[in-house]
Every structure is written in structure tokens, then in C-alpha cells.
């Protein structure tokens, strides 16, 4: 008598999940988030020094993964792709912060000259 195997299916690769994300599979994105969110938050925290900002960046990163999944070529490791997006989002966050700080500290006369 042959009994059905109770071994769980092997986990899908990140590349296979990205192919599914590119077709609109929400469950595939959820698995990628489950696998990699902690690492993204750790890297973003290290780069920004702000845990709350790091969590916001992690959301932006996975939104970018979702919206740009069709551009993922799989030429390198998925984690490298993911962490490149993370670094870019951290840099964007830093630029926004510096721009906001510059506006706050700009002399009022300068602001009046800039506004018609």
C-alpha cells in the first residue's frame, strides 16, 4: 500500500516568488515580506538611525517590489535587489529630511525672495 507523502513542499525560491508577484499574486509578495522584512528593517535602521523611519522605509521598499516586479530580471540574487531598493529609499529619506531642515532654518528674507 502506498501512502501519500506528508512532507511539506519545498519552499519556493525568491526568484519564483518574484515571477508570481509580477503576475499580481499577493500571496507571493506576502511570503517575500515574511522572509525579508526583518532584514530590510535592520538595514534601514542602521542607515537612518531611526527605527520608526526604518519601518516606514520597509513599507516603501515592498511597495516598490510590488510595483516594479515586472522589471526584476533575476540576474543577481533577490536579496541584493531588495537591499539596493532599501539603500535607495534610505537615501531618498535622508534627502527629504535635509531639505525639510534647510527650509526650516532658511532666513525669512530668503524665503520671501523665493516666493513670488
Image (cartoon, grey):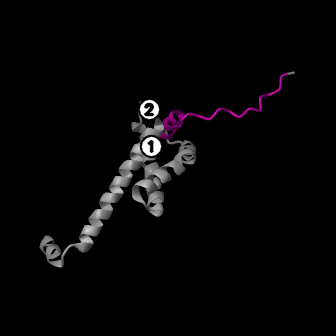
Quarter holding the C terminus is bottom left
Extreme residue toward the top, this view: 1
User: Where residue 112 sits in the image (x, y, percent)?
Assistant: 15, 76
**Residue where numbered disc 2 is placed:** 74
Residue at 83%, 26% (x, y): give it. 3
User: Of the numbered discs in the image, which one, if any, rests on residue 82?
Assistant: 1
- Side (left or right) of 14 relative to 108: right
Seen in the picture, residue 7 relative to 34 is either above or below; the reply is above
The magenta segment: 2-22
Q: How many numbered markers are drawn?
A: 2
User: Where residue 71 sits in the image (x, y, percent)?
Assistant: 39, 37
> Within the magenta stretch, is there residue 41?
no
User: Where residue 14 sits in the image (x, y, percent)?
Assistant: 52, 36
Seen in the picture, residue 12 relative to 100 is either above or below; the reply is above
Give the SS element for disc 2.
loop
Residue 8 in view, yes or no: yes
Seen in the picture, residue 96 relative to 39 is either above or below; the reply is below
Extreme residue toward the right, this view: 1
Give the SS element for disc 1.
helix
Quarter holding the N terminus is top right
- Side (left or right) of 105 relative to 64: left
Contact (Cβ within 8 Å) of mark 1 with mark 2? no
Residue 69 in view, yes or no: no
**Sequence-first tag of 1 and 2:** 2
- Side (left or right) of 34 relative to 48: right
Residue at 50%, 42% (x, y): give it. 24
Residue at 47%, 49% (x, y): give it. 62
Residue at 39%, 44% (x, y): give it. 84
Seen in the picture, residue 95 relative to 116 is either above or below; the reply is above
User: Of the numbered discs in the image, which one, if any, rests on residue 90?
Assistant: none
Amino acid at each position: 500500500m502506498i501512502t501519500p507523502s506528508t512532507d511539506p513542499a519545498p519552499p519556493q525560491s525568491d526568484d519564483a516568488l518574484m515571477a508570481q508577484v509580477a503576475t499580481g499574486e499577493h500571496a507571493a509578495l506576502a511570503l517575500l515580506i515574511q522572509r525579508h522584512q526583518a532584514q530590510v528593517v535592520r538595514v534601514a535602521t542602521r542607515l537612518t538611525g531611526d527605527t520608526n523611519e526604518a519601518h516606514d522605509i520597509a513599507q516603501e521598499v515592498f511597495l516598490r517590489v510590488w510595483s516594479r516586479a515586472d522589471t526584476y530580471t533575476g540576474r543577481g540574487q533577490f536579496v541584493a535587489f531588495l537591499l539596493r531598493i532599501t539603500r535607495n529609499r534610505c537615501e531618498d529619506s535622508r534627502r527629504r529630511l535635509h531639505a525639510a531642515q534647510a527650509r526650516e532654518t532658511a532666513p525669512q528674507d530668503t524665503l520671501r525672495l523665493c516666493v513670488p
